Amino acid sequence: MILPGATLGMLGGGQLGRMFTTAAQTLGYNVVVLDPDIHSPAGIIADQHICAKYTDESALRQLAELCDAITTEFENIPATTLAFLEQQTVVHPSSKALAATQNRINEKQFIASLGIPVAPFIAIRKTADIDTAKTTIQFPAILKVATFGYDGKGQVVCHTADDVRKAFESLGQVECVLEQRINLEREVSTVLARSQSGEISNFPVAENVHVNGILHSTTVPSRLPEAQVETAIQMADKIADGLAYVGVMAVEFFLSKEGDILVNEIAPRPHNSGHFTVDACETSQFEQQVRMLCGLPSGNCELVSPVVMINILGDVWGKSKPHWDSLLTRPENKLHLYGKKEARIGRKMGHFNVLAATVEQATNIAHQSFDDLKAD
Ligand code: ATP
Ligand code: MG
Protein backbone atom coordinates (compact mmCIF):
# COMPACT_ATOMS: atom_id res chain seq x y z
CA MET A 1 0.00 0.00 0.00
CA ILE A 2 1.10 3.53 -0.73
CA LEU A 3 0.28 5.45 2.44
CA PRO A 4 -0.39 9.11 3.37
CA GLY A 5 2.77 11.22 3.14
CA ALA A 6 3.56 9.71 -0.28
CA THR A 7 3.36 11.74 -3.48
CA LEU A 8 0.83 11.04 -6.23
CA GLY A 9 1.05 12.23 -9.80
CA MET A 10 -1.87 13.44 -11.90
CA LEU A 11 -1.64 13.70 -15.68
CA GLY A 12 -4.08 16.44 -16.61
CA GLY A 13 -5.11 19.53 -14.72
CA GLY A 14 -8.83 19.84 -15.41
CA GLN A 15 -11.69 19.72 -12.90
CA LEU A 16 -11.44 15.94 -12.54
CA GLY A 17 -7.77 16.31 -11.64
CA ARG A 18 -8.66 19.10 -9.26
CA MET A 19 -11.20 16.99 -7.35
CA PHE A 20 -8.70 14.09 -7.24
CA THR A 21 -6.12 16.51 -5.82
CA THR A 22 -8.51 17.67 -3.09
CA ALA A 23 -9.39 14.07 -2.17
CA ALA A 24 -5.73 13.00 -2.08
CA GLN A 25 -4.65 16.00 -0.03
CA THR A 26 -7.51 15.39 2.42
CA LEU A 27 -6.11 11.89 2.97
CA GLY A 28 -2.63 13.34 3.54
CA TYR A 29 -0.96 12.72 0.19
CA ASN A 30 1.05 15.25 -1.80
CA VAL A 31 -0.02 15.78 -5.39
CA VAL A 32 2.02 16.77 -8.43
CA VAL A 33 -0.01 17.78 -11.48
CA LEU A 34 1.38 17.79 -15.00
CA ASP A 35 -0.56 20.01 -17.39
CA PRO A 36 0.55 22.45 -20.10
CA ASP A 37 -1.84 25.19 -18.88
CA ILE A 38 -0.37 27.50 -16.24
CA HIS A 39 -3.92 28.25 -14.93
CA SER A 40 -5.20 24.65 -14.92
CA PRO A 41 -7.86 24.01 -12.22
CA ALA A 42 -5.81 21.20 -10.63
CA GLY A 43 -2.40 22.79 -11.17
CA ILE A 44 -3.31 25.86 -9.12
CA ILE A 45 -4.18 23.78 -6.02
CA ALA A 46 -1.58 21.01 -6.33
CA ASP A 47 1.51 20.80 -4.10
CA GLN A 48 3.49 21.12 -7.30
CA HIS A 49 2.54 21.90 -10.87
CA ILE A 50 4.81 20.80 -13.69
CA CYS A 51 3.73 23.04 -16.54
CA ALA A 52 4.72 21.03 -19.60
CA LYS A 53 3.37 19.09 -22.55
CA TYR A 54 2.31 15.45 -22.04
CA THR A 55 5.04 14.42 -24.46
CA ASP A 56 7.90 16.31 -22.76
CA GLU A 57 10.21 13.47 -21.70
CA SER A 58 12.28 15.47 -19.25
CA ALA A 59 9.09 16.70 -17.52
CA LEU A 60 7.77 13.13 -17.44
CA ARG A 61 11.04 11.90 -15.94
CA GLN A 62 10.77 14.60 -13.28
CA LEU A 63 7.17 13.55 -12.54
CA ALA A 64 8.17 9.88 -12.23
CA GLU A 65 11.02 10.76 -9.87
CA LEU A 66 8.74 12.81 -7.62
CA CYS A 67 5.81 10.37 -7.50
CA ASP A 68 5.15 7.02 -5.84
CA ALA A 69 2.24 6.42 -8.24
CA ILE A 70 0.68 8.23 -11.19
CA THR A 71 -2.82 8.35 -12.64
CA THR A 72 -4.77 10.42 -15.15
CA GLU A 73 -7.99 12.38 -15.53
CA PHE A 74 -8.01 12.61 -19.29
CA GLU A 75 -8.27 9.79 -21.88
CA ASN A 76 -6.49 11.77 -24.56
CA ILE A 77 -3.11 11.69 -22.82
CA PRO A 78 -0.98 9.80 -25.36
CA ALA A 79 -0.82 6.12 -24.36
CA THR A 80 2.91 6.32 -25.13
CA THR A 81 3.23 8.84 -22.27
CA LEU A 82 1.80 6.31 -19.81
CA ALA A 83 3.98 3.55 -21.27
CA PHE A 84 7.03 5.77 -20.73
CA LEU A 85 6.06 6.40 -17.09
CA GLU A 86 5.24 2.72 -16.48
CA GLN A 87 8.92 1.90 -16.93
CA GLN A 88 9.77 4.14 -13.99
CA THR A 89 6.94 4.03 -11.45
CA VAL A 90 3.45 2.69 -10.62
CA VAL A 91 0.84 3.84 -13.18
CA HIS A 92 -2.92 3.08 -13.07
CA PRO A 93 -4.86 2.71 -15.30
CA SER A 94 -2.34 1.07 -17.64
CA SER A 95 -1.29 2.51 -20.99
CA LYS A 96 -2.98 -0.52 -22.57
CA ALA A 97 -6.35 0.13 -20.90
CA LEU A 98 -6.15 3.81 -21.82
CA ALA A 99 -5.28 3.00 -25.44
CA ALA A 100 -8.34 0.76 -25.73
CA THR A 101 -10.63 3.72 -25.02
CA GLN A 102 -8.88 6.39 -27.10
CA ASN A 103 -10.31 5.47 -30.46
CA ARG A 104 -14.08 5.03 -30.78
CA ILE A 105 -13.68 2.29 -33.40
CA ASN A 106 -11.36 0.15 -31.24
CA GLU A 107 -13.48 0.87 -28.19
CA LYS A 108 -16.70 -0.28 -29.83
CA GLN A 109 -15.06 -3.33 -31.37
CA PHE A 110 -13.63 -4.28 -27.98
CA ILE A 111 -16.99 -3.88 -26.20
CA ALA A 112 -18.78 -5.87 -28.92
CA SER A 113 -16.11 -8.60 -28.67
CA LEU A 114 -17.21 -9.14 -25.06
CA GLY A 115 -20.73 -9.85 -26.32
CA ILE A 116 -22.00 -6.50 -25.06
CA PRO A 117 -24.34 -4.60 -27.39
CA VAL A 118 -23.37 -1.22 -28.85
CA ALA A 119 -25.20 1.00 -31.34
CA PRO A 120 -24.75 -0.33 -34.92
CA PHE A 121 -21.68 1.40 -36.36
CA ILE A 122 -19.23 1.39 -39.22
CA ALA A 123 -15.74 2.87 -39.51
CA ILE A 124 -15.41 5.69 -42.04
CA ARG A 125 -11.78 6.17 -43.07
CA LYS A 126 -12.28 7.17 -46.70
CA THR A 127 -15.17 8.44 -48.80
CA ALA A 128 -15.70 4.99 -50.35
CA ASP A 129 -16.61 3.60 -46.91
CA ILE A 130 -19.76 5.75 -47.00
CA ASP A 131 -21.18 3.56 -49.80
CA THR A 132 -20.83 0.48 -47.58
CA ALA A 133 -22.42 2.42 -44.71
CA LYS A 134 -25.52 3.08 -46.83
CA THR A 135 -26.38 -0.59 -46.82
CA THR A 136 -25.51 -1.38 -43.19
CA ILE A 137 -26.54 1.65 -41.12
CA GLN A 138 -30.04 3.05 -40.85
CA PHE A 139 -30.53 6.80 -40.95
CA PRO A 140 -30.60 9.10 -39.07
CA ALA A 141 -27.06 8.39 -37.97
CA ILE A 142 -24.31 10.34 -36.26
CA LEU A 143 -20.85 10.79 -37.73
CA LYS A 144 -18.30 11.09 -34.89
CA VAL A 145 -14.57 11.68 -35.06
CA ALA A 146 -12.83 8.51 -33.85
CA THR A 147 -10.37 10.32 -31.60
CA PHE A 148 -10.26 13.44 -29.40
CA GLY A 149 -14.04 14.06 -29.28
CA TYR A 150 -15.63 15.21 -26.02
CA ASP A 151 -18.82 16.92 -24.87
CA GLY A 152 -20.43 16.13 -28.22
CA LYS A 153 -17.70 17.95 -30.18
CA GLY A 154 -16.81 16.46 -33.56
CA GLN A 155 -20.28 14.96 -34.10
CA VAL A 156 -22.68 15.59 -36.97
CA VAL A 157 -26.21 14.19 -37.35
CA CYS A 158 -26.74 12.81 -40.86
CA HIS A 159 -30.02 11.93 -42.59
CA THR A 160 -28.64 10.73 -45.93
CA ALA A 161 -25.41 9.32 -47.37
CA ASP A 162 -24.90 12.72 -48.94
CA ASP A 163 -25.03 14.32 -45.48
CA VAL A 164 -22.34 11.86 -44.39
CA ARG A 165 -20.15 12.86 -47.31
CA LYS A 166 -20.50 16.55 -46.45
CA ALA A 167 -19.97 15.91 -42.73
CA PHE A 168 -16.87 13.79 -43.44
CA GLU A 169 -15.48 16.70 -45.49
CA SER A 170 -16.35 19.23 -42.77
CA LEU A 171 -14.54 17.08 -40.18
CA GLY A 172 -11.41 17.17 -42.33
CA GLN A 173 -11.73 13.52 -43.50
CA VAL A 174 -10.17 12.29 -40.27
CA GLU A 175 -10.96 8.76 -39.11
CA CYS A 176 -14.62 8.64 -38.07
CA VAL A 177 -17.32 6.27 -36.96
CA LEU A 178 -20.86 6.42 -38.32
CA GLU A 179 -23.27 5.33 -35.64
CA GLN A 180 -26.96 4.68 -35.87
CA ARG A 181 -28.94 7.23 -33.85
CA ILE A 182 -30.72 5.33 -31.11
CA ASN A 183 -34.30 6.17 -30.22
CA LEU A 184 -33.49 7.08 -26.62
CA GLU A 185 -35.81 6.28 -23.74
CA ARG A 186 -33.13 7.42 -21.29
CA GLU A 187 -29.40 7.52 -20.64
CA VAL A 188 -27.68 6.10 -17.59
CA SER A 189 -24.11 5.62 -16.47
CA THR A 190 -22.20 3.80 -13.82
CA VAL A 191 -18.90 4.48 -12.11
CA LEU A 192 -16.87 1.62 -10.70
CA ALA A 193 -13.56 1.07 -8.97
CA ARG A 194 -11.46 -2.01 -9.72
CA SER A 195 -8.53 -2.95 -7.50
CA GLN A 196 -5.18 -4.48 -8.38
CA SER A 197 -6.52 -7.87 -7.26
CA GLY A 198 -9.61 -7.49 -9.48
CA GLU A 199 -12.22 -6.65 -6.85
CA ILE A 200 -14.90 -4.31 -8.17
CA SER A 201 -17.09 -1.89 -6.28
CA ASN A 202 -19.93 -0.08 -8.03
CA PHE A 203 -21.51 3.26 -7.31
CA PRO A 204 -25.28 3.41 -7.83
CA VAL A 205 -26.43 3.72 -11.45
CA ALA A 206 -27.10 7.36 -12.38
CA GLU A 207 -29.65 8.74 -14.83
CA ASN A 208 -28.37 11.48 -17.13
CA VAL A 209 -29.87 14.20 -19.28
CA HIS A 210 -27.70 15.69 -22.03
CA VAL A 211 -28.38 19.01 -23.73
CA ASN A 212 -26.57 19.68 -27.04
CA GLY A 213 -24.37 16.62 -26.42
CA ILE A 214 -23.21 17.93 -23.01
CA LEU A 215 -24.26 16.44 -19.70
CA HIS A 216 -26.82 18.72 -18.02
CA SER A 217 -28.11 16.75 -15.05
CA THR A 218 -27.61 13.49 -13.18
CA THR A 219 -30.26 11.97 -10.92
CA VAL A 220 -29.73 9.18 -8.38
CA PRO A 221 -31.47 6.84 -7.72
CA SER A 222 -32.31 6.38 -11.41
CA ARG A 223 -35.77 5.30 -12.59
CA LEU A 224 -34.28 2.15 -14.06
CA PRO A 225 -36.01 -1.13 -13.08
CA GLU A 226 -33.84 -3.27 -10.78
CA ALA A 227 -33.24 -5.93 -13.47
CA GLN A 228 -31.82 -3.32 -15.86
CA VAL A 229 -29.65 -1.86 -13.10
CA GLU A 230 -28.19 -5.33 -12.61
CA THR A 231 -27.62 -5.75 -16.36
CA ALA A 232 -25.85 -2.38 -16.64
CA ILE A 233 -23.59 -3.15 -13.69
CA GLN A 234 -22.75 -6.61 -15.04
CA MET A 235 -21.83 -5.11 -18.42
CA ALA A 236 -19.64 -2.42 -16.82
CA ASP A 237 -17.87 -4.98 -14.62
CA LYS A 238 -17.26 -7.26 -17.61
CA ILE A 239 -15.65 -4.36 -19.49
CA ALA A 240 -13.44 -3.51 -16.49
CA ASP A 241 -12.37 -7.16 -16.19
CA GLY A 242 -11.77 -7.35 -19.94
CA LEU A 243 -9.41 -4.38 -19.73
CA ALA A 244 -7.76 -5.74 -16.53
CA TYR A 245 -8.56 -2.22 -15.41
CA VAL A 246 -7.12 -0.77 -12.19
CA GLY A 247 -8.66 2.47 -10.96
CA VAL A 248 -11.96 4.29 -11.40
CA MET A 249 -13.82 4.09 -14.69
CA ALA A 250 -17.26 4.97 -16.00
CA VAL A 251 -19.53 3.38 -18.57
CA GLU A 252 -22.26 5.36 -20.38
CA PHE A 253 -25.36 3.51 -21.58
CA PHE A 254 -28.22 4.15 -23.97
CA LEU A 255 -31.65 2.71 -23.16
CA SER A 256 -33.67 2.49 -26.33
CA LYS A 257 -37.44 2.94 -26.64
CA GLU A 258 -37.43 -0.70 -27.79
CA GLY A 259 -36.11 -1.74 -24.35
CA ASP A 260 -32.47 -2.49 -25.28
CA ILE A 261 -29.47 -1.55 -23.16
CA LEU A 262 -26.47 -0.53 -25.27
CA VAL A 263 -23.07 0.71 -24.17
CA ASN A 264 -22.32 4.18 -25.53
CA GLU A 265 -18.75 4.64 -24.35
CA ILE A 266 -16.17 4.06 -21.62
CA ALA A 267 -14.32 6.73 -19.67
CA PRO A 268 -11.04 5.51 -18.14
CA ARG A 269 -11.31 7.94 -15.22
CA PRO A 270 -13.87 9.44 -12.84
CA HIS A 271 -16.80 10.91 -14.72
CA ASN A 272 -18.95 14.03 -14.71
CA SER A 273 -21.99 11.83 -14.03
CA GLY A 274 -20.22 10.61 -10.86
CA HIS A 275 -19.93 14.05 -9.28
CA PHE A 276 -22.99 13.29 -7.15
CA THR A 277 -20.82 10.85 -5.16
CA VAL A 278 -18.86 13.73 -3.63
CA ASP A 279 -21.80 14.88 -1.51
CA ALA A 280 -24.25 11.98 -1.68
CA CYS A 281 -22.19 8.81 -1.20
CA GLU A 282 -20.20 7.46 1.72
CA THR A 283 -17.08 7.69 -0.46
CA SER A 284 -16.52 9.95 -3.48
CA GLN A 285 -15.36 8.71 -6.89
CA PHE A 286 -12.18 10.76 -6.34
CA GLU A 287 -11.36 9.15 -2.99
CA GLN A 288 -11.90 5.81 -4.76
CA GLN A 289 -9.42 6.89 -7.42
CA VAL A 290 -6.85 7.63 -4.70
CA ARG A 291 -7.63 4.31 -2.99
CA MET A 292 -7.26 2.22 -6.16
CA LEU A 293 -4.04 4.00 -7.14
CA CYS A 294 -2.53 3.42 -3.70
CA GLY A 295 -3.65 -0.20 -3.29
CA LEU A 296 -5.99 0.69 -0.42
CA PRO A 297 -9.28 -1.18 0.00
CA SER A 298 -12.35 0.30 -1.68
CA GLY A 299 -14.46 2.75 0.30
CA ASN A 300 -18.17 2.24 0.84
CA CYS A 301 -20.07 3.27 -2.32
CA GLU A 302 -23.50 3.50 -0.74
CA LEU A 303 -25.84 6.38 -1.48
CA VAL A 304 -26.56 8.47 1.60
CA SER A 305 -29.27 10.70 0.09
CA PRO A 306 -31.28 11.14 -3.11
CA VAL A 307 -29.41 13.64 -5.24
CA VAL A 308 -29.58 15.70 -8.42
CA MET A 309 -26.38 17.10 -9.94
CA ILE A 310 -26.57 20.07 -12.31
CA ASN A 311 -23.65 21.19 -14.46
CA ILE A 312 -22.86 24.90 -14.54
CA LEU A 313 -21.61 25.85 -18.00
CA GLY A 314 -20.16 29.18 -19.09
CA ASP A 315 -23.58 29.81 -20.70
CA VAL A 316 -25.04 31.02 -17.36
CA TRP A 317 -22.65 33.98 -17.24
CA GLY A 318 -24.03 37.21 -18.69
CA LYS A 319 -23.11 40.85 -18.31
CA SER A 320 -22.81 40.04 -14.63
CA LYS A 321 -21.82 36.90 -12.74
CA PRO A 322 -24.35 34.15 -12.02
CA HIS A 323 -26.50 34.68 -8.92
CA TRP A 324 -24.43 32.60 -6.51
CA ASP A 325 -26.29 34.19 -3.60
CA SER A 326 -29.61 32.63 -4.59
CA LEU A 327 -28.00 29.22 -5.09
CA LEU A 328 -26.14 29.32 -1.78
CA THR A 329 -29.19 30.51 0.15
CA ARG A 330 -30.77 27.07 -0.20
CA PRO A 331 -29.17 24.66 2.25
CA GLU A 332 -29.86 21.67 -0.05
CA ASN A 333 -27.40 23.00 -2.67
CA LYS A 334 -23.73 22.02 -2.58
CA LEU A 335 -21.72 24.23 -4.95
CA HIS A 336 -18.46 23.15 -6.61
CA LEU A 337 -16.59 25.64 -8.82
CA TYR A 338 -13.45 24.70 -10.72
CA GLY A 339 -11.49 27.95 -10.52
CA LYS A 340 -11.63 28.63 -14.29
CA LYS A 341 -11.05 32.31 -15.02
CA GLU A 342 -12.85 32.61 -18.33
CA ALA A 343 -16.49 31.60 -18.86
CA ARG A 344 -17.18 30.41 -22.41
CA ILE A 345 -20.31 28.91 -23.96
CA GLY A 346 -20.31 25.15 -23.35
CA ARG A 347 -17.33 25.30 -20.95
CA LYS A 348 -17.81 23.34 -17.72
CA MET A 349 -17.26 25.91 -14.95
CA GLY A 350 -18.68 23.98 -11.99
CA HIS A 351 -21.66 21.99 -10.80
CA PHE A 352 -23.98 21.75 -7.84
CA ASN A 353 -25.45 18.78 -6.03
CA VAL A 354 -28.91 19.02 -4.53
CA LEU A 355 -29.57 16.68 -1.62
CA ALA A 356 -33.15 16.19 -0.47
CA ALA A 357 -35.42 13.60 1.13
CA THR A 358 -36.80 12.46 -2.24
CA VAL A 359 -35.70 12.60 -5.87
CA GLU A 360 -38.80 14.69 -6.65
CA GLN A 361 -37.87 17.31 -4.08
CA ALA A 362 -34.25 17.38 -5.23
CA THR A 363 -35.39 17.72 -8.85
CA ASN A 364 -37.68 20.66 -8.07
CA ILE A 365 -35.05 22.51 -6.07
CA ALA A 366 -32.42 21.79 -8.74
CA HIS A 367 -34.52 23.21 -11.57
CA GLN A 368 -35.54 26.28 -9.62
CA SER A 369 -31.99 26.94 -8.40
CA PHE A 370 -30.64 26.57 -11.92
CA ASP A 371 -33.23 29.03 -13.30
CA ASP A 372 -32.43 31.52 -10.52
CA LEU A 373 -28.69 31.18 -11.17
CA LYS A 374 -28.69 32.65 -14.68
CA ALA A 375 -27.00 36.02 -14.86
CA ASP A 376 -28.82 39.09 -16.22
P1 ATP B 1 -18.53 12.90 -23.46
O1 ATP B 1 -17.17 12.32 -23.61
O2 ATP B 1 -18.60 14.23 -22.83
O3 ATP B 1 -19.55 11.94 -22.92
P2 ATP B 1 -18.71 12.61 -26.31
O4 ATP B 1 -18.26 13.72 -27.16
O5 ATP B 1 -17.89 11.40 -26.18
O6 ATP B 1 -19.06 13.22 -24.92
P3 ATP B 1 -21.03 10.94 -26.82
O7 ATP B 1 -21.10 10.31 -25.49
O8 ATP B 1 -20.67 10.11 -27.98
O9 ATP B 1 -20.13 12.26 -26.83
O10 ATP B 1 -22.42 11.67 -27.16
C1 ATP B 1 -22.91 12.71 -26.37
C2 ATP B 1 -24.42 12.59 -26.27
O11 ATP B 1 -25.02 12.69 -27.59
C3 ATP B 1 -24.90 11.27 -25.74
O12 ATP B 1 -24.85 11.22 -24.34
C4 ATP B 1 -26.33 11.23 -26.31
O13 ATP B 1 -27.18 12.10 -25.60
C5 ATP B 1 -26.12 11.79 -27.70
N1 ATP B 1 -25.79 10.68 -28.63
C6 ATP B 1 -24.55 10.32 -29.03
N2 ATP B 1 -24.58 9.24 -29.83
C7 ATP B 1 -25.88 8.89 -29.94
C8 ATP B 1 -26.58 7.84 -30.65
N3 ATP B 1 -25.95 6.94 -31.40
N4 ATP B 1 -27.92 7.79 -30.53
C9 ATP B 1 -28.59 8.70 -29.79
N5 ATP B 1 -28.00 9.70 -29.12
C10 ATP B 1 -26.65 9.81 -29.19
MG1 MG C 1 -20.40 10.49 -23.75
Image: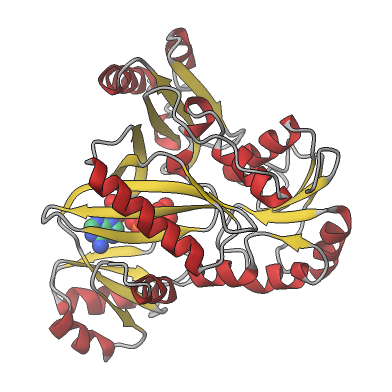
Of 127 and 327, the residue lying toward us? 327
Please identify the quadrant where the C terminus is shown: top left
Rendered residue at 46%/70% (across/down): 147
The one nearer the camera, 292 or 181, is: 292
Task: Mark yes or no: residue 41 visible.
Answer: no
Please indicate, yes or no, whether residue 331 appears anywhere in the rendered image. yes
Residue sitting at x 50%, y 36%: 301
In the image, 258: left or right of 339?
left
Give the quadrant of residue 83.
Answer: bottom right
> What kind of colouring is applied to the model shown?
secondary structure
Residue shown at the point (33%, 81%) measured from the top left: 123
Residue 152 location (% of width, % of height): 36, 55
Horizontal relation, residue 31 to residue 108: left or right: right
Instruction: Identify the residue at the far bottom of this view.
Output: 128
Q: Position of residue 367 (x, y in %)?
A: 29, 23
Q: How many marks?
A: 0
Which percent across, then down, holds residue 362? 33, 20
Q: Most extreme residue toward the left, as rendered? A: 258
At a point 18% along the width and 58% down the height, the residue shown is 260
Q: Whole-percent x and y of residue 96?
A: 60, 72
